[in-house]
Image: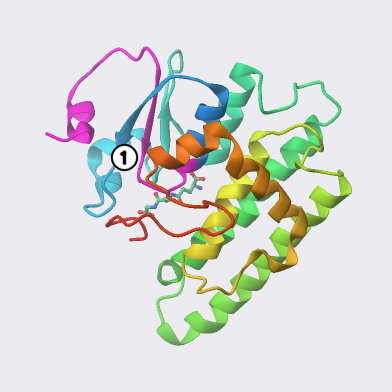
């Protein structure tokens, strides 16, 4: 019995976080945040090759059948949506996000929603165009349009990194925004873009990625996700079935 099946069939008491994911999927963002926070968690691998995320049991955790899900002690229901999960964690542990009454709270929230609603969302559509456009003939131009939108989003973020003086989106203070952005920059370089997006036009983002790559918690998260080498500056997909399916 796999870990996934075991967890699905037992009714255990949750005494620490439980993260459901698949290598290099959006759970990577949550994992990096958990590692940076130093919080204990169990990891439940979800096999994307056999579409375990679409099973009835998993849909009870997330009706969309999407990864990641986080179960959190003290919460009535499982959490889904990457941005909601990391915001919840950072607020709960009072780290990697400004306090509610801090002067950069508004700035933090606007970029968090931008990364989630615009950048990550466009990337998702870019990776799976068939879900949105059934006809083959329109997929080329559609992909070009999306790639332009994605490039522009990275340029907005690069501009913000410059405007704040960096090296982080909130200036001197690292937050979960930087982590979420780094994962998006990784995926944009390797999944489906065939080199169409690179770090060439985003020097401030490149500097941020250099810093993040060296952090022990990020390195540990990469190792656990089976991500080898330079995860953000010279990314390669993990050599695993089901990662991009
Ligand atoms: N908006 C969601 C998107 C999550 C998402 O796209 N998950 C992907 C993995 S990165 C997934 O579960 N794909 C499997 C599928 O679409 O069936 C979030 O931020 O959590």
Q: Is residue 98 above or below residue 209?
A: above
Pointer 1: what residue? 59
The scheme the figure's colours follow is rainbow
Give the x, y percent position of residue 57: 24, 36
Residue drawn where x is 54% and y is 59% of the image: 234
Q: Secondary structure at mark 1?
A: helix
Asked if residue 116 can be seen in this view, the reply is no
Residue at mark 1: C-beta within 8 A of ligand 1: no
**Mark 1, other Cα within 10 Å: few <14 / some 14–19 / many ≥20:** some
Residue drawn where x is 45% and y is 74% of the image: 133
Q: Residue extending furthest bottom? A: 137
Give the x, y percent position of residue 124: 50, 59
- Quarter of the N terminus within the rendering: top left
Q: Quadrant of residue 130?
A: bottom left
- Quarter of the C terminus within the rendering: bottom left
Asked whether 26 falls inside the magenta stretch, the response is yes
Query: In the rendered structure, which segment of residues is drawn in magenta?
Result: 1-28
Q: Is residue 39 above or below residue 44?
A: above
Q: Is residue 143 above or below residue 36?
A: below
Asked whether 161 falls inside the magenta stretch, the response is no
Q: Is residue 65 left or right of residue 40?
A: left
Give the x, y percent position of residue 65: 35, 46
How many marks overall? 1
Q: Is residue 85 left or right of residue 66?
A: right
Asked if residue 17 can be seen in this view, the reply is yes
In the foreground, 42 or 110: 42
In the foreground, 55 or 6: 6
Give the x, y percent position of residue 153: 70, 60
Residue drawn where x is 62% and y is 67% of the image: 198
């Amino acid at each position: 019995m796999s870990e996934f099946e075991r967890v699905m069939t037992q009714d255990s008491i949750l005494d620490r976080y439980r993260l459901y994911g698949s290598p290099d999927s959006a759970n990577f963002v949550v994992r990096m945040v958990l590692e940076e926070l130093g919080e204990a968690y169990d990891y439940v691998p979800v096999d994307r090759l056999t579409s375990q995320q679409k099973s009835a049991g998993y849909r009870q955790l997330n009706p969309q059948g999407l990864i990641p899900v986080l179960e959190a002690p003290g919460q009535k229901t499982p959490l889904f949506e990457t941005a909601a999960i990391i915001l919840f964690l950072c607020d709960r542990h009072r780290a990697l996000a400004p306090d509610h009454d801090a002067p950069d709270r508004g700035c933090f929230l606007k970029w968090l929603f931008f990364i989630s609603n615009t950048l990550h969302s466009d990337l998702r559509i870019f990776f799976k165009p068939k879900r949105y456009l059934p006809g083959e003939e329109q997929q080329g131009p559609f992909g070009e349009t999306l790639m332009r939108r994605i490039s522009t989003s990275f340029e907005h973020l690069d501009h913000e990194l410059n405007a704040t003086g960096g090296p982080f989106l909130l200036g001197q203070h690292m937050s979960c925004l930087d982590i979420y952005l780094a994962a998006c920059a990784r995926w944009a370089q390797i999944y489906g873009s065939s080199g169409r997006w690179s770090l060439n036009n985003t020097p401030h983002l490149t500097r941020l990625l250099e810093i993040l790559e060296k952090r022990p918690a990020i390195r540990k998260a990469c190792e656990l996700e089976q991500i080898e080498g330079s995860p953000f500056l010279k990314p390669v997909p993990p050599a695993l079935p089901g990662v991009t399916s």
